[in-house]
Image (cartoon, grey):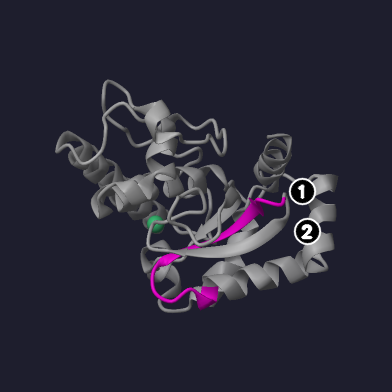
Amino acid sequence: MRQALAIATLSTLPFAALAQTEGEFTLPDLPFATDALEPAISAETMELHHGRHHQAYVDNLNEAIADGEAPSDLSLEELVAAAGTFTDKVRNNAGGHWNHSFFWESMAAPDEVGERSPELAEALEAVFGSADDFATAFQEAGAGQFGSGWVWLIVNDQDQLQITTTPNQDNPLMDVAEVNGTPLLGNDVWEHAYYLTYNNRRGDYLKAWWDVVDWGVVSERYAAALAD
Ligand code: MN3
């Protein structure tokens, strides 16, 4: 089945969520305490977002696989890469599980976030002008995503940094994505990610979020993407 689908391994992100344990996907633990990202992201938001929303994606994905909507021997990355060949339930919930697992790993407490590597800093400047210009462009793309979705920084097929957005729980690894690439960073612009604190002010959330982005992790992903 794996070979028949001819799925490329587009990234090698080492989070536990990718593999099934005893035939089921499981909710990964948060890599920080639920209140660690305050004030950018409140403990209450984290508890609901991880404990309820992410758990629901995991549960619904397992249910869809149990119902025969996708093979039971595929990794999460393989399901995501071939999302367009499965049902919407598989696409949405495999995407939801991947995206949130990636999202948690992208953040840290404000006093524990890592720095941009010189290589990433240079590439951001070359493409966007400056780190601030990148941040502004990323925020604008996130604010401009109509309805629910994600905003991403990716390495595209030409090994170039690019900002892109996806609707719902799609991501740039999916066969159905308009722009494919290796995600380095993604922000969740679903209302459930920010509404309790920011209400309808998505732009304020996008701006505050930079305080908890772990650029050390993003830099490692950048190096890995270029090495592929
Ligand atoms: Mn979410």
Asked if 220 appears above or below 100 in the picture, the reply is: above
Regarding residue 28, the answer to whether it shows in the image is yes
Residue found at x 17% / y 37%: 68
Q: Is residue 63 left or right of residue 107?
A: left
Please state which of residues 42 and 137 is positioned toward the viewer in this rendering. 137
The amino acid type, in three-letter code, at marker 2 is Leu
Asked if 201 appears above or below 148 in the picture, the reply is: below
Please state which of residues 34 and 227 is positioned toward the viewer in this rendering. 227
Quadrant location of the C terminus in the rendered image: top right
Which mark, by number, is residue 116? 1
Q: Is residue 112 magenta?
A: no
- The residues tagged by marks 1 and 2 sit, at their Cα atoms, a distance apart of 10 Å
Whether tag 1 and tag 2 are in contact, CB under 8 A, the answer is yes
Q: Is residue 150 magenta?
A: yes
Q: Is residue 91 left or right of residue 105?
A: left
Asked if 148 appears above or below 156 in the picture, the reply is: below
The amino acid type, in three-letter code, at marker 1 is Arg
Dot 2: element: helix
Count of numbered circles on the image: 2
Tag 2 residue: 124
Quadrant location of the N terminus in the rendered image: top left
Find the magenta span and give its range: 143-158
